[in-house]
């Protein structure tokens, strides 16, 4: 077959130059085999067209080829190659959230995710790979159409069973493998199954015949290779040939290649033991990846004891029915989509789909409940990573609960229990989608619905939507008081106080937050929300001028966080302590606290903590005599704020450090140099900005000298005789 020459770098070539481009395309777990012509052709099409769609029958290798082309061409895209796996996404309304997630974007605002995508991609040169979109084709086509129209540097490589039918789309039909490539693939996978056995000339002839029988479909070949643990190549061919004649005899209307794949999958299914077939069918309820614990709980039961699931799972792994994936959260597993669909058909034929979906829902409801409790512990980062990995399954669990009016309250419970993920891990936009979605179904004002209301109010506060926040919080409080729900009342009061802070009413905020803390004490509530109420009270007190009282509150919070291993709320306590330390003339202490705050924000993807810390750190840096670096840090914060919401909430109090810093730096640098520093900071992505801030930027000397002055400086440091906030000077107390 003709081999096209194409100028891209082979990632498997050890002599090829290396770089670290942005993106999320996963590394290949085994060697990519063949497809030289197809890869070169696709690479050429991407030079000529902005939308290339790889289409073909199930199992033909669309996903693998698209990923390979993405890896080969990544150096063309200075802003990265990004893969969005869409097969686990069932709700069209979640498509854009899934793409936002794939791009690694965090957005705290109330902007629609499509707006976030457009604004992020508008001036970037990137490749977006959309895989497994066929069940969302209309929504996907609409999104791609707008992204390509609004982002001229964007290209899209899609992989699915049908084209998107978008103007400008070039469709590339991926054919099955040629004989040479098919035999090489089968032989490669056979060696991984039996590395101790050298193939004979007879084996090679049988392998060629097998590849003909399976029409060169890669998934079918890999399934057949998995059988070599127990059979010879001749035995595989003989048995598959028998099954092929049997299974294709009654399905003449199906395309031959589709019949060949279903024959290979069906034959693998026929050769499975009853326990293996049962597990295969039950595993089909998962969306995306799953772990062993979930598989044991959900799939164990009649016909398959939970303690037997591991052994049966290992057997399905050995037969290439299940794939293993190792990542940050440990060992996880998944079914390829064609294999999952086949299992789902058997589950439906057994009449067991609804029961298994409920077991799936119950497991993930329990997981979310456990994670909510464990969030207030030293395992916060682990909890965040776990929920991140399980998000497709959590979505499916909420969808399951929304299908029956009698179970909507479970969707409420699940959406509300994930408050820590929505608010603490940069998922406000998707959180708001689910919170509003589950409230669409009318249910009594039970505890789960009231929780959804206060969580929705909290999310709206953080998004800067005061109208949406007060609407949800007022409804929550009125119904909570009417029903005597003291817990929901306390949370409604608390989040109303939080709203008062960001809308510049610190006196009202203090009143509400003290009331909320009193209510929490009465009901014995202690968790990250309660700790945040203390931090927010400290902010309200500080904004009214009493830095001593604010620092005392946050020192108590710091001790409480250390006792419980809490880190997320600690970041905000450190921010307040850094603010107080700076006002007291202790910039190095402020810097250390802000450094820890930035590290925590990076762990939880918390944009608000990051932006606030960068703003205050800019003022610290200016006071230490590095005006140029201060301007860069302000520019870096400016780049983050659009994803948070209104910069500094539009608050005079939160915005005071920025105003002071700008006045000082403009005075020292002049307008042109200050604006140049801002532009340099805006060019830094969040990770680079945090790394720079933690690295210290320019050169400084320690200046924790209580008697020293701080303010505009050219070499030394100055400190005002009295604090602007309290009117008091003197040495630091803590």
Image (cartoon, helix red, strand yellow):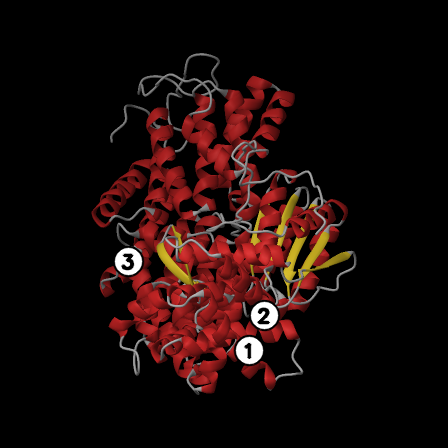
Q: Is residue 156 left or right of residue 556?
A: right
Do labels 2 and 1 touch, CB within 8 Å?
yes
Residue in the foreground of this view, choosing between 90 and 350: 350
Q: What x and y, as percent, mark residue 173?
A: 70, 61
* CB contact under 8 Å: marks 3 and 1: no
Which mark sits nearer the N-terminus, 2 or 1?
Answer: 2
Residue 133 at x, y = what percent? 61, 64
Alpha-carbon span between mark 3 and mark 2: 53 Å
Q: Residues within 10 Å of mark 3 (few under 14, many from 20)?
A: some
The residue indicated by pointer 1 is: 244
Circle 1: element type? helix
Crowd tier of the residue under label 1, counting other residues whose Cα lies within 10 Å: few below 14, some 14–19, many 20 or above: many
Q: Earlier in the sequence, mark 3 or mark 2?
A: 2
**Which quadrant of the structure image shows residue 449?**
bottom left
Relative height, residue 460 to residue 248 (above, below): above
Residue at the outermost front position: 201
Q: Which image quadrant is residue 558 in?
A: top left
Residue that label 2 marks: 213
Could you say which is closer to the camera, residue 12 or residue 633? Answer: 12
Q: Is residue 700 visible?
A: yes
- Give me the C-alpha separation between circle 2 and circle 1: 8 Å
Distance from disc 3 to disc 1, alpha carbons, whole Å, reads 52 Å
Q: Secondary structure at mark 2?
A: helix
Local SS, label 3? helix
Residue 472, can we see it? no
**Residue 374 numbered tag:** 3
């Amino acid at each position: 077959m003709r081999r096209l020459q194409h100028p891209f770098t082979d990632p498997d070539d050890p002599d090829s130059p290396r770089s670290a481009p942005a993106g999320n395309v996963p590394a290949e777990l085994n060697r990519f085999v063949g497809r030289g012509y197809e890869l070169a052709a696709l690479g050429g099409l991407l030079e000529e067209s902005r939308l290339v769609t790889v289409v073909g029958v199930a199992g033909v290798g669309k996903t693998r080829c698209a990923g390979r082309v993405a890896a080969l061409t990544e150096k063309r895209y200075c802003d990265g190659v990004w893969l969005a796996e869409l097969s686990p996404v069932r709700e069209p309304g979640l498509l854009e959230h899934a793409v936002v997630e794939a791009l690694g974007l965090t957005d705290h605002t109330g902007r629609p995710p499509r707006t976030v995508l457009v604004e992020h991609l508008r001036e970037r040169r990137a490749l977006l790979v959309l895989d497994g979109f066929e069940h969302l084709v209309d929504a996907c086509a609409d999104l791609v159409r707008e992204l390509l129209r609004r982002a001229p540097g964007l290209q899209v490589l899609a992989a699915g069973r049908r084209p998107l039918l978008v103007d400008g789309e070039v469709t590339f039909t991926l054919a099955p493998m040629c004989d040479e490539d098919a035999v090489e693939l089968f032989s490669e996978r056979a060696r991984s199954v039996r590395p101790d056995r050298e193939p004979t000339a007879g084996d090679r002839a049988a392998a060629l015949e097998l590849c003909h029988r399976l029409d060169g479909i890669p998934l079918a070949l890999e399934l057949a290779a998995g059988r070599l643990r127990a059979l010879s190549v001749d035995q595989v061919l003989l048995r598959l040939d028998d099954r092929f004649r049997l299974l294709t005899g009654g399905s003449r209307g199906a395309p031959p290649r589709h019949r060949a794949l279903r024959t290979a999958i069906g034959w693998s299914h026929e050769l499975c033991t009853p326990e293996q077939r049962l597990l295969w069918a039950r595993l089909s309820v998962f969306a995306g990846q799953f772990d062993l614990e979930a598989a044991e709980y959900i799939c164990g039961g009649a016909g398959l004891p939970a303690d037997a699931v591991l052994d049966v799972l290992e057997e399905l792994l050995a037969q290439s029915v299940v794939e293993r994936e190792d990542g940050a959260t440990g060992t996880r597993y998944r079914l390829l989509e064609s294999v999952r669909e086949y299992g789902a058909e058997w589950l439906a034929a057994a009449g067991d789909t609804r029961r298994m979906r409920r077991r799936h829902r119950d497991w993930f409801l329990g997981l979310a409940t456990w994670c909510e409790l464990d969030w207030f512990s030293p395992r916060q980062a682990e909890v965040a990573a776990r929920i991140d990995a399980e998000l497709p399954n959590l979505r499916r669990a909420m969808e399951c609960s929304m299908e029956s009016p009698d179970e909507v309250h479970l969707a409420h419970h699940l959406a509300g229990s994930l408050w820590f993920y929505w608010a603490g891990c940069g998922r406000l936009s998707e959180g708001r989608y689910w919170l509003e979605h589950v409230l669409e179904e009318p249910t009594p004002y039970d505890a789960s619905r009231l929780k959804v209301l206060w969580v929705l109010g909290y999310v709206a506060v953080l998004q800067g939507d005061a109208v949406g926040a007060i609407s949800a919080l007022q409804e929550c409080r009125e119904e909570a008081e009417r029903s005597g729900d003291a817990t929901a009342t306390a949370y409604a009061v608390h989040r109303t106080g939080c709203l008062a802070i960001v809308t510049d009413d610190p006196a009202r905020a203090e009143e509400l937050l003290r009331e909320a803390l009193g209510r929490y004490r009465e009901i014995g509530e202690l968790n990250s929300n309660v700790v945040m109420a203390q931090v927010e009270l400290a902010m309200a007190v500080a904004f009214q001028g009493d830095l001593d009282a604010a620092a005392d509150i946050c020192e108590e919070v710091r001790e409480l966080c250390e006792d419980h291993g809490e880190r997320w709320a600690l970041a905000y306590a450190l921010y307040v302590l850094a603010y107080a330390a700076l006002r007291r003339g202790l910039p190095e202490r402020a810097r250390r606290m802000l450094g820890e705050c930035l590290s925590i924000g990076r762990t939880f993807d918390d944009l608000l903590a990051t932006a606030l810390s960068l703003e205050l750190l800019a003022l610290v840096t200016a006071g230490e005599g590095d005006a140029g670096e201060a301007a860069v840090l302000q520019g870096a914060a400016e780049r983050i704020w659009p994803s948070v919401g209104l910069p500094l909430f539009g608050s005079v109090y939160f915005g005071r450090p920025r105003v002071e810093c700008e006045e000082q730096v403009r005075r020292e640098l002049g307008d042109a140099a200050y604006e140049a520093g801002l532009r340099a900071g805006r060019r830094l992505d969040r990770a680079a900005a945090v790394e720079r801030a933690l690295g210290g930027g320019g050169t400084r000397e320690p200046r924790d000298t209580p008697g020293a002055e701080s303010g505009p400086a050219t070499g030394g440091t100055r400190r005002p005789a009295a604090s602007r906030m309290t009117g008091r000077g003197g040495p630091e107390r803590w």
